[in-house]
Amino acid sequence: MAKKVVSKHPAIEGESDPTKYEALDGEWRKIGLAAPARRALVDAKLYKVSDLRKISLSDLNNLHGMGKSAIARLSAIMEAKKIRFR
């Protein structure tokens, strides 16, 4: 009998609630991040640019859905706001 794989990511489990993300990803939408990056940030409990102080660049790169374009955009905005990764 095959083991059932349990994922902590709601989209993978088939229990995705788009309204959950819409209520929390407003700042990321304004920045123009793609949906996978926005979901990754919300799942990591990062809701605004200043929250990125809580995470290292390495950890951000390891978030599922976070691509090169999103990292570059976030890094540029952080630099402009004088915010640094942990």
Image (spheres, helix red, strand yellow):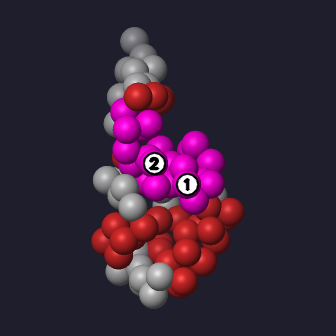
* Amino acid type, callout 1: Lys
Vertical relation: 48 (above or below) 36: below
* Amino acid type, callout 2: Gly
Which residue is drawn at the image coordinates 36% and 71% (left, top)?
A: 50
Say if the magenta span includes residue 22: yes
Q: Whole-percent x and y of residue 54? A: 31, 71
What quarter of the picture does the N terminus occupy? Answer: top left
Vertical relation: 76 (above or below) 47: below
What quarter of the picture does the C terminus occupy? Answer: bottom left
Q: Is residue 1 left or right of residue 72?
A: left
The answer to whether residue 49 is visible is yes
Q: Is residue 2 left or right of residue 54?
A: right
Q: Whole-percent x and y of residue 11? A: 47, 29
Which residue is drawn at the image coordinates 60% and 77% (left, top)?
A: 76
Residue bearing mark 2: 26
Q: Is residue 68 left or right of residue 12?
A: right
Residue bearing mark 1: 30
Q: Give the structural element (helix, strand or loop) at label 2.
A: helix
| Res 77 quadrant in image | bottom right
Which residue is drawn at the image coordinates 42% and 83% (left, top)?
A: 83
